[in-house]
Amino acid sequence: MTAGDDIVIREITPEVVTFSRPFTRFYGAFPMGGRSTAIRLSTGNVWVVASTPLSPETKETVNKLGKVEFILAADADHHIFLSEWKQEYPEAKLIGVQGLAEKKRSESLKFDYTYGVDDPKFGFEEDIDSLYFSGFSKKDVAWLHKPSKSLIVADLIFNLPANEQYSKSKSSPKVAFFFPKFEPYSKFHQDFVWKEGKNKEAMKTAAKTVATWDFERIIMCHGDVIEKDAKKAWETAYARYLV
C-alpha cells in the first residue's frame, strides 16, 4: 500500500487498483470517503471510475497500469473530478449517465457515451459487465470485473465507517452519533435503497440481475471494500427487491 498526501493507493489485484481519500458531508458530521477504481483490461488499456482527484501519485500509478482508454462517472452525482481526468487523458472515451451531460455543460465536457441513452456496448465487455440502474434516484451503474470477481458501485452500496479512506487523515472516519449505522446489513441501508428506488419494478430487475453475478468483493465509492461474503452483503441490502 502506498499513499500521497491523503490519497491511499491500494492494489486489490495486479489489474485492479483503488484510490481512496477522505470526503465528508453535512459539515463534517458524515465522513463517507471517496474512491476511484482503475482496472487494466485484457487489452492492456485502462478503465477508470473517476471519483477522486488526479493527484501526482494517482497519475503515476494509473500510467504504470497502461494507457487510459475509458473514464467513467459512477452516477449522476459523482462528476466533480471528471474534467481534470479528461483534460489529462483527452483521447480517453468519457462515459456518463443520463442527466449528467446537462450538469457538465458549463464545463464544456462532452460525453462519448451515456448509460440510459446509448447502447451499452462500449468496448470493454470482454472484461467488464455493466448494468444501468435506471430506477435508482442517482442513475447508478453496477460493474462486474469478471477476472477479479469484483463488483464496483457508487451509491448502490455503502459500508461505513470509511476506515481505509481516512487512514492517512487526521480526521476520524467515525460518523456522528445521530446518524444511523450505514452498511449493507443495517435496516437503515435497506430502507435507503428502497426509498431511492424510484421505479420499483426496474430496481427489482436490476437488483436480481446483480445477485446472479459471480463476485467475491464489492468496491464501493463510500466505505471499506467488502472482501468477505460480498454476495450476502448485496442480497441483504437489496432483500426487499429480491423477493
Image (spheres, rainbow, N blue to C red):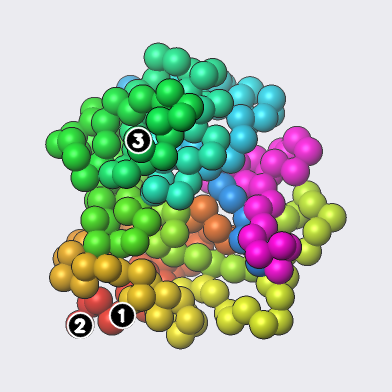
Tag 1, which secondary structure?
loop
> Closer to the camera, 28 or 8?
28
Q: Residues in magenta?
A: 1-29
The answer to whether 2 is drawn above or below residue 178 in the figure is above
Q: Verify whether residue 185 appears in magenta.
A: no
Is residue 205 in view?
Answer: yes
Q: Which residue is mark 2?
A: 243
The answer to whether 110 is drawn above or below residue 157 in the figure is above
Q: Which residue is mark 1?
A: 239
* Residue at x-position 45% and y-position 15%: 90
Amino acid type at circle 3 is Ala
Q: Quadrant of residue 193?
A: bottom left
Task: Return the residue found at the far top.
Answer: 91
The answer to whether 241 is drawn above or below residue 205 in the figure is below
How far apart are labels 2 and 1 at the CA level? 7 Å
Amino acid type at circle 2 is Val
Q: Verify whether residue 13 appears in magenta.
A: yes
- The answer to whether residue 107 is left or right of residue 195 is right
Q: Is disc 2 in contact with disc 1, using a CB cutoff of under 8 Å?
A: yes
Q: Which mark is residue 101?
A: 3
